[in-house]
Image (tube, grey):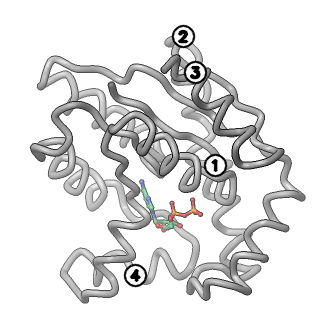
């Protein structure tokens, strides 16, 4: 089963993605985690991605699409993937479709985590104080929200038109939201 988690920064994609992965045994892939790991290890990918990430801008599509191709081709992804943090642009969404189609698969369900803006700011700034992510400051956060609105939000209509978008109200306790996610996926 191929599941996309869609939602703004701070909407809880990572937390809910991990719970869903544990429950279903489906591989979760977070492009944010893959990129942060690449930055930490100083790989070529990391060097290309770092300045965009620190500024709160999206990493260019061609870089991400190369990464997607590797992920979706891996043996671990054969039973499907929980996509956390991608696709983030229409171009990436088209690439995901194409890469899955080559394997006779498709996007089965898109879960949109819905959280009001003021709650998002509160969550991300709280996380900045704790985890020390280099992109969790107010300027980068505002740019990440703007990038989401401009480049990622169009995907909501893209998938809604296709009829596989499920909206999940993502305010409440983590287990409550996880239960809505479970119901949305139907397993
Ligand atoms: P958040 O959802 O909290 O913004 P992520 O960990 O998903 O955090 O992403 C962190 C950063 O990594 C993004 O701001 C962006 O620079 C980069 N990134 C992650 N996924 C993608 C993607 N699919 N396309 C472009 N850039 C991405």
Alpha-carbon span between mark 1 and mark 3: 19 Å
Report the front residue among 116 and 177: 177
Residue count near mark 2 (Cα–Cα under 10 Å), binned few <14, some 14–19, many ≥20: few
Residue at left 49%, top 40%?
A: 20
Q: Nearer the viewer, mark 1 or mark 3?
A: 3
Alpha-carbon span between mark 1 and mark 4: 21 Å
Q: Of the residues under marks 2 and 1, which one precedes in the sequence?
A: 1
Res 119 → quadrant: bottom right
Q: Of the residues under marks 4 and 3, which one precedes in the sequence?
A: 4
Q: Which mark is residue 163?
A: 2
Q: Of the residues under marks 1 and 4, which one precedes in the sequence?
A: 4
* Identity of the residue furthest to the right in this view: 118
Residue of label 4: 50
Q: Which mark is residue 150?
A: 1
Residue 41: x percent and y percent?
25, 87
Residue of label 3: 165
Left or right of residue 120, residue 41 in this image: left
Alpha-carbon span between mark 4 and mark 3: 31 Å
Residue count near mark 1 (Cα–Cα under 10 Å), binned few <14, some 14–19, many ≥20: few
Q: Of the residues under marks 1 and 3, which one precedes in the sequence?
A: 1
Residue 176: x percent and y percent?
75, 38
Establish if 104 lies above or below 6.
Answer: above
Disc 2 + disc 3, Cβ < 8 Å: yes
Label 1's element?
helix
Report the front residue among 66 and 5: 5
């Amino acid at each position: 089963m191929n599941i996309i988690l869609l939602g703004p920064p701070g909407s809880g994609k990572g937390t809910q993605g991990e719970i869903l992965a544990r429950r279903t045994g489906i591989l979760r892939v977070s492009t944010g985690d893959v990129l942060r790991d690449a930055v930490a290890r100083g790989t070529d990918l990391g060097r290309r991605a770092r300045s965009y990430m620190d500024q709160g801008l999206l990493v260019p599509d061609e870089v991400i699409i190369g990464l997607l191709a590797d992920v979706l081709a891996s043996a671990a992804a054969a039973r499907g993937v929980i996509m956390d943090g991608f696709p983030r642009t229409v171009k990436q969404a088209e690439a995901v479709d194409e890469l899955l189609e080559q394997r006779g698969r498709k996007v089965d369900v898109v879960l949109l985590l819905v959280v009001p803006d003021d709650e998002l700011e509160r969550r991300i700034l709280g996380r900045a104080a704790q985890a020390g992510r280099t992109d969790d400051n107010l300027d980068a956060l505002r740019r990440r929200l703007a990038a989401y609105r401009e480049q990622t939000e169009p995907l909501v209509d893209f998938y809604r038109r296709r009829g596989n978008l499920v909206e999940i109200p993502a305010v409440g306790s983590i287990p409550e939201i996880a239960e809505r996610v479970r119901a949305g996926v139907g397993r």
